[in-house]
């Protein structure tokens, strides 16, 4: 069974940093591209970043470019999102999701709240 | 960026109805258009990929059609458990984008 489990969220002050993790199981992690997608409270879905299976290709939404870094450790079956210079508008539920054009498996999400 | 416009924003339905939800792209996305269902307090679930391809485990009452800029998600015989928000998403070009969603409500 495919499972994606996010962790690392919490309450953080504006301007500070936070690192999210997503532990994958039930499939060969190193064969799949991975993504971070977020959802602000009561709002729709926003794609944040993608990384290819071997980390050769990495893409970001303009809203996070230069502040967020997506990475992965295939030996640990883990996807990461390093978030710096956090803003109030980054407050959202962050999902990790598998695949490269469509998102076929999603984690349960981890909440990030940016507030003083 | 490709803008996806979903309509209607809210749809009131009666169980058993056949309904159609629309998703229009601001430029062609070929068939790189995917549909998701999100129930309250749950993660989104993939319903249809590449405009019309079915997904294992998804009830057969869900179907998709379209190509280019106009797409439709149909539910043939709405059930109470289908009350959710439905999102379309394009995977043709970066940044990947989502529509704003259609919320299904009971009439």
Image (cartoon, coloured by chain):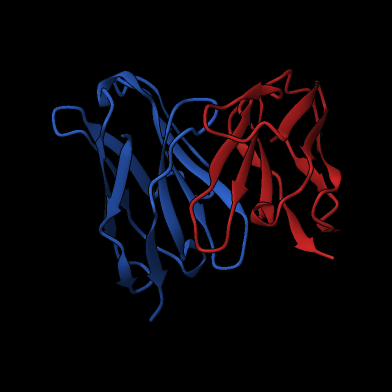
Chain colours: A blue, B red
Work out which residue is located at the far bottom of the displayed protein and give it: A116
Left or right, A29 with reference to B93: left
> In this view of the protein, which residue sits in the foreground, A40 or B49?
B49
How many badges with numbers are in the image?
0
At 71% from the left edge and 19% from the top edge, which residue is drawn?
A: B31
Image quadrant where one finds the C terminus of chain B: bottom right
A38 vs B46: above or below: below
Q: List x then y, in percent, for residue A77.
A: 20, 33
At 85% from the left edge and 42% from the top edge, which residue is drawn?
A: B18
Left or right, A92 with reference to A22: right
Q: List x then y, in percent, for residue B61.
A: 72, 35
Rendered image quadrant of residue B99: top right
At 39% from the left edge and 64% from the top edge, which residue is drawn?
A: A111
At 50% from the left edge and 63% from the top edge, which residue is drawn?
A: B41
Image quadrant where one finds the N terminus of chain B: top right
> In this view of the protein, which residue sits in the foreground, A108 or B12?
B12
Q: Is residue A102 visible?
A: yes
Q: List x then y, in percent, for residue A85.
A: 37, 60
> In this view of the protein, which residue sits in the foreground, B73 or A10?
B73
């Amino acid at each position: 069974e495919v499972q994606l489990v996010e962790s690392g969220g919490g309450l953080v002050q504006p301007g500070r940093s936070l690192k999210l993790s997503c532990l994958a199981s039930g499939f060969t992690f190193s064969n799949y591209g991975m993504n971070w997608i977020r959802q602000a409270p009561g709002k729709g879905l926003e794609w944040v970043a993608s990384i290819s299976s071997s980390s050769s290709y990495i893409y970001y939404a303009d809203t996070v470019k230069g502040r967020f870094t997506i990475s992965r450790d295939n030996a640990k079956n883990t996807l990461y999102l390093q978030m710096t210079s956090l803003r109030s508008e980054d407050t959202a539920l962050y999902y990790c999701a598998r695949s490269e054009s469509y998102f076929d498996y999603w984690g349960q999400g981890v909440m990030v709240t940016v507030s003083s | 960026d490709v803008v996806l416009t979903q309509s209607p924003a809210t749809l009131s339905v009666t169980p058993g109805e056949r309904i159609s939800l629309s998703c229009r792209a601001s430029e062609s996305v070929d068939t790189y258009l995917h549909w998701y269902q999100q129930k309250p307090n749950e993660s989104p679930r993939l319903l249809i990929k590449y405009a019309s391809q079915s997904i294992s485990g998804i009830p057969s009452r869900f179907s998709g059609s379209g190509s280019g800029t106009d797409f439709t998600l149909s539910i043939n015989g709405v059930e109470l458990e289908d009350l959710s928000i439905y999102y379309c998403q394009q995977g043709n070009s970066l940044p990947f984008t989502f529509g704003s969603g259609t919320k299904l409500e009971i009439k």
